[in-house]
Image (tube, grey):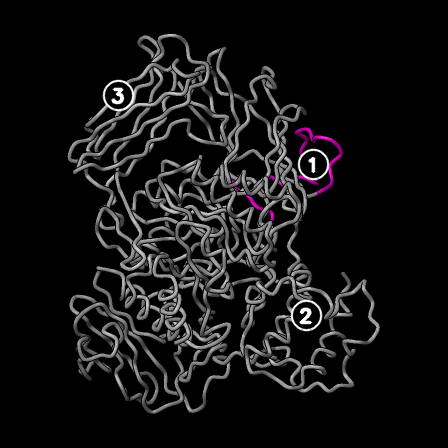
Amino acid sequence: MRFSETLHDGWLFTKEAVDGVPAYAPGPEWEAVEVPHTWNAFDGQDGGSDYYRGACWYVRQLTLKPHAPETRVYLEFQGAANVAEVYVNGCKITEHVGGYSTFRADITTALMPGENVLAVKVSNEERTDVYPQMADFTFYGGLYRPVDVLYVNPTHFELDYHGGDGVTVSSTIDDGTAVLDARAWVTEPAEGDVVNFQIFDDDGNEVASAAVPADLGDGNVRTEIVIPDAHLWQGVEDPYLYDVVATIIRHNEVLDEVSFLHGVREFRFDPQEGFFLNGKLTPLRGVSRHQDRLGKGNALSLEDHVEDAYLIKELGANTIRLAHYQQSRDFYDLCDQLGFVIWAEIPFISRMSDDPAAHQDCLSQMTELVIQNFNHASILMWGISNEILIGGDSPKLVENLKEINDLAHSLDPTRVTTMAQVSSTPKDSEHNQITDILSYNHYFGWYGGHFEDNEAWLDDFHAMHPDRSFGLSEYGCEGIISYHTDDPQCGDYSEEYQALYHEHMARIIDERPWLWGTHVWNMFDFGCDARKEGGVEGRNNKGLVTIDRKIKKDSFFIYQAYWSAEPMVHICSKRYARRAADTIDVKVYSNQDEVALAVDGKPFATLAASAQNDPHIFIFKDVPLADGYTHVTVRAGIVEDSATWQKVAEPYEPYKFVDPEGGNIVMNWFDDVSADDGLPVDAPYDEAYYSVHDTVSAILDNPEASATVTNAASSLANMRIKASMLGVLGNKSLVEMFDQLRNMSGGASDIPQKLAYLNKQLQQIKK
């Protein structure tokens, strides 16, 4: 019978170069660590784009549990980023490419009596054959998910096929009756062995079962199981799950057992109406999630995953885009149990590598994603790529995307495929016809344009493609809780502007139920060592919650007001504590019909939701501030909230973001250059350094050159621009790109001198 143990402690770790395969020999170059572990927990979040990327070693002694002589012993790694080599007693057992999925190795024949030595070489160094190639997040290295030893009978459910369970169950519904398609793959079955499937309800009662000989079809078995009057998995409304237990039986003995939870559900996407779960219109409204935390990187505990899931539940979301890679099995389990509808994807992101081996890695990661997570009821969409046009388009890219899409369908015909398009992807792009459904990443109102551009674009695309179900896979803006203002503006990084942005987005999304899904970017701030935004290094600050999970920003509560059924009320701008004013407007979010405000214990006003422009936003005008401190309380039904503000004589300057390098909020870093400051386009230049003659895709390969060009483009187009907005221009030279941006923005007439200045800056960056 199968059993396992987790190898949590007893590990030694080193970044030092090692000749050959290390033995277990503690010394000054070795550090005692516990797994999960990453070596980038701190340098991957402190900025500078200089976190360690290389090969490191883990070693530990391995003493086996008592087991029967014929037992097969496996090692299971739930995640090793990004490439791993596994050695037992100096012998190489396996190698795995791809940092986000489970892999296993049968180590039985490499074991010796008594103590054994397990050594694992893990690397997150840059390679052309491993995805992700480039992205706006830190690629943490390490054994960052659990490592287990599995003990199994020689006859067991398949463990060697892409890290899967060896058992799958899917279901269809016919007039309330669930028909389960149950399959199993058995290693070394003997004549007369039986695979037995049992289905239990959540009270532990057996409601259905089926048995099938295990020695049919080389151990590949299939049967149907019927559950009359099945209780359906209705997402967050009612995430009902059955317990599936599959066993291999020989005579009167169970040789192996696998169990998991199964939700019976059906779904469909209607381009004109939206998403339906079990026949009920269910607009999917939620967030995206990165898996890292402050001071931990991506080496998370079960408790960390639980906290994340319940914070998202508290928000009121019913869907999560798990970006941009396969995430922990613990988190997928939580999503099944809490009812979140999940978009699961692979890290085919930003740019396609020309290395043919990279495409094979892409196919491998998609195979592992599907095979390992097939049994999760929460997963309804397989994502094949994200913003892949940043690196430019090509016939080969289209061919590769179609192959990945076909692979996902061949592995799992029960779900749909999707992809997230970079904002600049043309509406009539061939890429919009590859997957079953699609989504776009848009940041109108942050990187460029205005709030209202969002609904204009969405409505235009909807009218142009009435037969395509599409959604909003990313949208958001930076919000740093130390910055505050009474006059929020795009680019000021204030908590007030982020709230204003999301107020608008929550409303226009609510008005468009035909959007099959929308996902805020991002639920949590996350590590990106290359970033320096709003004075915060090494972090993307677009989260509704801070990276340490300690603080919910005001923007969190506008979605809670829209999405949560639990009564709530929240006063905005509490952290804007020092006010240089006699009166202020007090903004309140609530999902209740009426909100009452009291000032220093005295009733001030009551506002009805029906009288507001937005029924979830209540604005109390001209609330007086007394000398010293003013205390306010709001009550909405059974819930209340309070805040305190201090009246001061002068504005508190630290509330305003000022670039310490002297720049402005809007990046106009070369607005005042003259023709004498640069290197004209037609002047001789050194090809060993970057220049305006290089293509956008070549520039994006270098962080320093990419940042230089992005800032220049922002100044030229008079709007904030991120690298991904330049993606579809990837094969154009910078000269051609600037000409196109000038046309887009009705921009500057002094292009030659600005190009000359940019050319001179790029000529200082060596390729």
Q: In which quarter of the image is residue 180?
A: top left
Amino acid type at mark 2: Leu
On the image, the x and y values in percent for residue 585 come to: 31, 84
Q: Residue 734 carries which label?
A: 2
Which residue is nearer to you in this view: 451 or 564?
A: 451
Q: Assign a secondary structure to mark 2.
A: helix
Give the mark nearer the N terminus: 3 vs 2.
3
Q: Name the residue under label 3.
A: 210
> In the rendered view, would you say 73 is above or below 720?
above
User: Can residue 665 be spotted in the picture?
Assistant: no
On the image, the x and y values in percent for residue 27 come to: 69, 36
Check if mark 1's residue and mark 2's residue have beta carbons within 8 Å.
no
Q: Quadrant of residue 693?
A: bottom right
Residue interval drawn in magenta: 16-39
Give the mark nearer the N terminus: 1 vs 3.
1
Is residue 664 magenta-colored? no
Q: In which quarter of the image is residue 576?
A: bottom left
The structure residue drawn at horizontal position 35% and vertical position 57%, both measured from the top left corner, is 467
Q: Residue 27 carries which label?
A: 1
Amino acid type at mark 1: Gly
> In the rendered view, would you say 58 is above or below 117?
below
On the image, the x and y values in percent for residue 586 come to: 30, 81
The structure residue drawn at horizontal position 42% and vertical position 81%, both measured from the top left corner, is 488
